[in-house]
Amino acid sequence: MSQHMQLRIELLDTDPPVWRRVVVDPELTLAQLHMVIQLAMGWTNSHMHEFQTKKGERIGVPYEDSFEPITDERKVRVGEMFPRANVKLAYVYDMGDDWVHAITFEKRAEPPAQGSTQGEPPAAALLDGARACPPEDCGGIPGYYDILDLLSKRKSADDDEHERLERLGDWRPERFDPATARRALAKMRVKQPAKKKVGKKKPNKKKKKATRVWRLRGT
């Protein structure tokens, strides 16, 4: 039985940090890792996303209007992206709110026993974490801190602020309930990467070059 990989996922620019620790099968594709992150963090998978390497490579769902080539995430294994401990990968969710996550390969780990089916361990499991991910479409990091500030003065909030508080429902920044994510991840199994379609080659289209910036500052 091959060892899994222990990854730490942290939402950048949050203080106290919003983070999760997971173990994943290195044979998972990055498309599957995307779903692991969504489930572990508590996102709703309602927006575009992509992975970015330190060398500027973009990995995600290719689309025709992209100014730069995007490697198909269904054809890349997690193990390929993390050849050694402490290697980092950026994961960006919602290109409007621009939630940037740092994924760090911490160490090799034993496959999780919980959720095993007929001796086969789940492909991913949530170990630990802290704090709820921000509400979707709240305006990115600035909007997130606006919400935290609003919650801190809820007793003195005016009518408009009370309306905003009501829209939050029962969301609270300190609440992190891993049970739902653990149940969902227990069903995940390794899939074979997508195969390239055989057919006529399309002529190469010249596209604008855009400068890529490594999203994990200071690393």
Image (tube, helix red, strand yellow):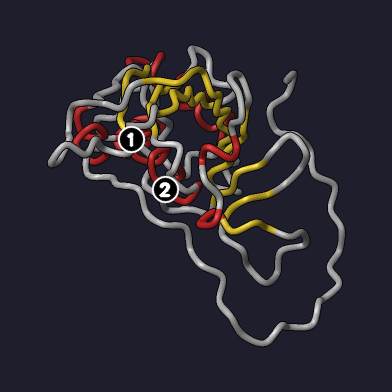
As drawn, 142 above or below 148: below
Tell which circle, 2 or 1, labels the residue nearer the N-terminal end: 2
As drawn, 148 above or below 98: above
Which residue is label 2 attached to? 32
Amino acid identity at mark 2: Gln
Snapshot quadrant of residue 199:
bottom right
Point out the image quarter for the N terminus.
Answer: top left
The residue shown at (36%, 46%) is 44
Which residue is label 1 attached to? 124
Snapshot quadrant of residue 173:
top left
Q: Residues within 10 Å of mark 1 (few under 14, many from 20)?
A: many
* Alpha-carbon span between mark 2 and mark 1: 10 Å
The residue shown at (20%, 26%) is 113
- Point out residue 131 in the picture as x, y percentages from the top left corner: 37, 19
Please state which of residues 196 and 67 is positioned toward the viewer in this rendering: 196
Circles 2, 1 touching at the beta carbon (< 8 Å): yes
Q: Give the SS element for disc 2.
A: helix
Residue 203 located left or right of residue 72: right
Please state which of residues 169 and 112 is positioned toward the viewer in this rendering: 112
Please state which of residues 182 and 93 is positioned toward the viewer in this rendering: 182
Point out the image quarter for the C terminus.
Answer: top right
Residue 53 located left or right of residue 141: right
Amino acid identity at mark 1: Ala
